Image (spheres, rainbow, N blue to C red):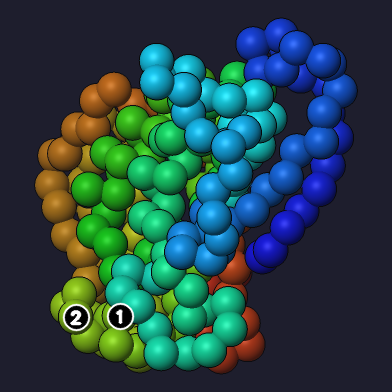
Amino acid sequence: MGLVRQTFTSSQEDVRDGEVEIRCLDPHLCVERRQERPEERRSASGSPSRSARTTASTSGSSTISSPRPGLYGNAWLEPLNSLAFAAALTKKVKIATGILVLPVRHPVVLAKEISTLCHLSENRYMFGVGPGWYAREYEVTGSRIEERGRRTDEIIEAVTLLLTRPNASYQGKYYQFNDVTIEPRPPKMPAIWVSGDRACRTRPTTTCP
């Protein structure tokens, strides 16, 4: 995570000067960590500043606050809402969750949220996911950390079905549904990026219970 820099040539809707520097920064790092600069504020009319139009965010999340120091102890904004805001301020920039902790979410609700974000961003969203790490987060959302690998696999499978076909049905160990249709569905399935580690791989095989 952290700051990633790249340059691109934007359309006029994104910026007036052509080539700009895009800074991809996790939104949670900005919460209560610094004072807002005047050029970053939105005008009274609601128009974004030039800085906002030239900045894209990738977003990670932990649902609840963690006592862990450093990066993971920061205040996290909800990632899909944050990216909807980023999508509204840009036209060409790709937006991605990096990462979305899947085992704390339900696949049907998540599929609807992703479909909405795809439409708002004109299909610029990339579905970055992972199993997570914070045991307390699973406990308060009705699962266990030992289940995170299989839950992650099942959610990826179920969300893919829901976003690519009507009347979808799924029967997994942890998630089951029959004849569910999400509308409107995106014209194509977002690219999926999967994060993990040796303790809990989610692709191509699952080593967690």
- How many numbered dots are placed on residues in this image? 2
* Residue count near mark 1 (Cα–Cα under 10 Å), binned few <14, some 14–19, many ≥20: many
* Residue count near mark 2 (Cα–Cα under 10 Å), binned few <14, some 14–19, many ≥20: few
Q: Which residue lies furthest to the left in this view?
A: 178
Could you tell me if residue 192 is visible in this image? no
Relative to residue 7, is residue 137 depicted above or below?
A: below
Relative to residue 39, is residue 70 depicted above or below?
A: below
Relative to residue 121, is residue 170 depicted above or below?
A: below
Q: In which quarter of the image is the C terminus?
A: bottom left
x then y, percent, for residue 18: 83, 16
Mark drawn on residue 113: none
Secondary structure at badge 2 equals helix
* Residue at the image point whose x is 29% and y is 22% from the top: 184
Whether the residues at callouts 1 and 2 have beta carbons within 8 Å, the answer is: yes
Relative to residue 138, is residue 180 depicted above or below?
A: above
Could you tell me if residue 22 is visible in this image? yes
Say which residue label 1 marks: 137
Q: In which quarter of the image is the N terminus?
A: bottom right
Q: Which residue lies furthest to the top in this view?
A: 12
**Type of amino acid under label 2:** Val
Say which residue label 2 marks: 140
x then y, percent, for residue 25: 64, 53
* Residue at the image point whose x is 56% and y is 60% from the top: 34
* Residue at the image point whose x is 86% and y is 23% from the top: 19
Q: Is residue 87 left or right of residue 136?
A: right
**Type of amino acid under label 1:** Glu
* Residue at the image point whose x is 52% and y is 84% from the top: 200
x then y, percent, for residue 15: 71, 17
Secondary structure at badge 1 equals helix
Label 1 and label 2: CA atoms lie apart by 6 Å
Q: Is residue 89 left or right of residue 120?
A: right
x then y, percent, for residue 26: 58, 57
